[in-house]
Image (cartoon, rainbow, N blue to C red):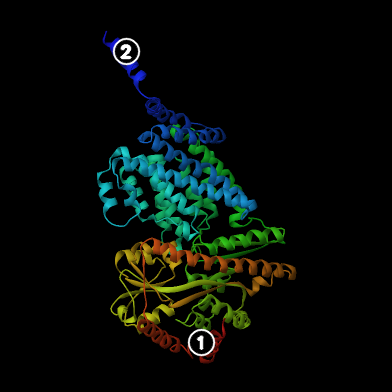
Amino acid sequence: MRRSFVLFGLSLGLVTVTACDKAKFAANLNAGVLDKATAAFDEERDPWLARAAATSNLKLYEGLLQAAPENKTLLVLAASAYAFYASAFLEDELEELEQRDAGSSAHGELRARIGTYYLRARHYAERRMDLDFEDFSRAMGRRGDRLAQILSTCEEEHVAALYWLAFACRGHAANYADDPAQSTDLANVTRVMGWVRERSPGFDGGGPHRYFGLLGSALGRGLSGGMDAARQSFEAAVAASDGKSLLAKVQLARAIHAAMNDRKAYEQTLRELLDASEDLSAPLRLSNAIAKARARRWLEQSDALFGSATPAASTIELSVATLSPESSSAALILRGAARELHTRSSGRVTLRVHAGGQRGDATAMSEGLASGTLAGAQLRASDLVPELAVLQAPRLITTAAQLDFVLKKLTPRIEKALLDKGLVLLGVTDGGLRYAVSTGRIAAPPDLQKRSFGVENGDREAMSVATKASATVTPFETRDLGAQLAAGHVTTALASPLQALTLGWFESLKSVTGYPLALTVGATVLRKVDWDRLSAADRALVKDIMARWHATLVTRSRVDADRAVTTLRARGIEFVPVDTAAAAQWDALARAVQDEPAGKSYPKALLDEVRAWVKQAP
């Protein structure tokens, strides 16, 4: 009797509810079924079949969410589906497309689609969290303590939403790492994933640890000293999955072994991975199948990454290093030039690009050029020829037009000066204008007094500005200024807005003095002895290719610099106005710094010439 009553009551209720309520009821009912059905998806052996199924699921989840927009299970399913689809399928497709058609419209469209999918994943994850904390989305986009307060009250039920939120944000940031306008503030994102790692380190086969491994390895050894920590994160991911997550191992090979130029460890890790059983863990079967597919593809690329183990007698391989991160415009442009050179020379000339400080800091790279362990490098012009420090003298060159005009006059002399040192100039780079960035507010030189001014070893311009302004000089060995700022060891430094943004320094900054103080000029060079190994035809080919790609880099760097300023403003960084009196003080300080090295780093006559050219510039 009771069962009949319940059924009758349920039937009567269905008759009287609206069609909208029926749809919502059905959506809520299906959510639990779909959640349980994800196990079958995760256990699929065939990535092709999984992709076909996932494609239809994306719109299925969105369709159900239209009927039940506050269903927490559906929101997490949608977030995870879009994030996983972009990472597991679209990023692999993008990598393959980059090998054969980088820069094409198809490449650009796919990259944009990946970015969109990651943004959708973030949107659904934030909607899920907003149901329990109505200001969660706002807290994610702001500084302050509110996010930490929310995380302190989160429970196990929030792990999945928070994980896929952070996963999607990092994926989006990595996809647009070379575009300041699309940059993602990872400070709060990393706090979220840190909470997940603490609460559920084995989620998604050690996914929280993989996040930190990828984040650290993206900056590179020379920029952050983070490669050891990144390696430990990948190893922790393997341990968190009891060795059953092959994805952690394949990412270890690519992000660490390849970046550190360790071919033996790279190939050994990938081969061990390929020999592993696909049935190590049923819930990780699809993930492991994808990892195996990547391992096969990446193993085939060993020669492209490290150079042929038995190169043809007619093949010349040139190793070129840069401190710029793997995802920076500088590294991407160098790799583009390398691909074109390899294709147009029919494989006769291969350029091996080592980015992110893989071959050490500026000093180590200079030593590599001297010893022959490096064929080429991208360094500050003053690191290559001390006299070229004149180009970076504070307030001497302050516009792109001035720099272009001066370089047109000076390039023949630069080429000769480099040739005298056994180096051939392949291209000049514009590193952008540097400003006083601070955790406080700097408007005029007196504001620098007693400030802790961070100066990287060898940065003559920053050292001179800090000393003349009576600041307290705080030297540091690496370019990890972010750690120094965050720890409070440094309060002020000279940096370009692009540096502050892409390297995460802005997270500790409050202001940028709105008056450019110095310029960074770089140069890409090749050792003359390696240049002479090339045939006359190949030397002409290298010159042509490098000239065009460097012109592209200069244009792109200047666009990036403008976008970085806009992005920093949008993130709440104040650009402190400089009035006429303060400008005069900065100019007087700069003039004194310009004059001081005259006759030491660079001839007084050269300084006078550059000053005259600057006045003639359009």
**Rendering coords of residue 406 (x, y %):** 57, 81
Label 1 crowd (10 A; few <14 / some 14-19 / many >=20): many
Task: Give the residue displayed 64% in from the left and 67% down from the top.
Answer: 548
**Rendering coords of residue 601 (x, y %):** 48, 86
Label 2 crowd (10 A; few <14 / some 14-19 / many >=20): few
**Rendering coords of residue 560 (x, y %):** 50, 64
The disc label shown at residue 505, or none: none
**Rendering coords of residue 551 (x, y %):** 61, 69
The disc label shown at residue 8, or none: 2
Q: CA distance from mark 2 to mark 1?
A: 95 Å
**Where is residue 223, by image quadrant?**
bottom left
| Residue closest to the eye, 522 or 68 | 68
Quick one: SS at disc 2?
A: helix
Q: First in sequence: mark 2 or mark 1?
A: 2
Amino acid at dot 1: Tyr
For the N terminus, the image quarter is top left
Task: Give the residue displayed 32% in from the left and 43% down from the top.
Answer: 130
**Where is residue 294, by image quadrant?**
top right
Question: Compared to 535, does 587 lie above or below?
Answer: below
For the C terminus, the image quarter is bottom right
Closer to us: mark 2 or mark 1? 2
The disc label shown at residue 602, or none: 1
| Residue closest to the eye, 550 or 277 | 550
Question: Compared to 257, does 367 lie above or below?
Answer: below
Question: Compared to 267, does 521 lie above or below?
Answer: below
Residue 202, can we see it? no
Task: Give the residue displayed 27% in from the left and 52% down from the top.
Answer: 146
State if disc 1 and disc 2 touch (CB < 8 Å): no
Q: Is residue 218 left or right of residue 489?
A: right
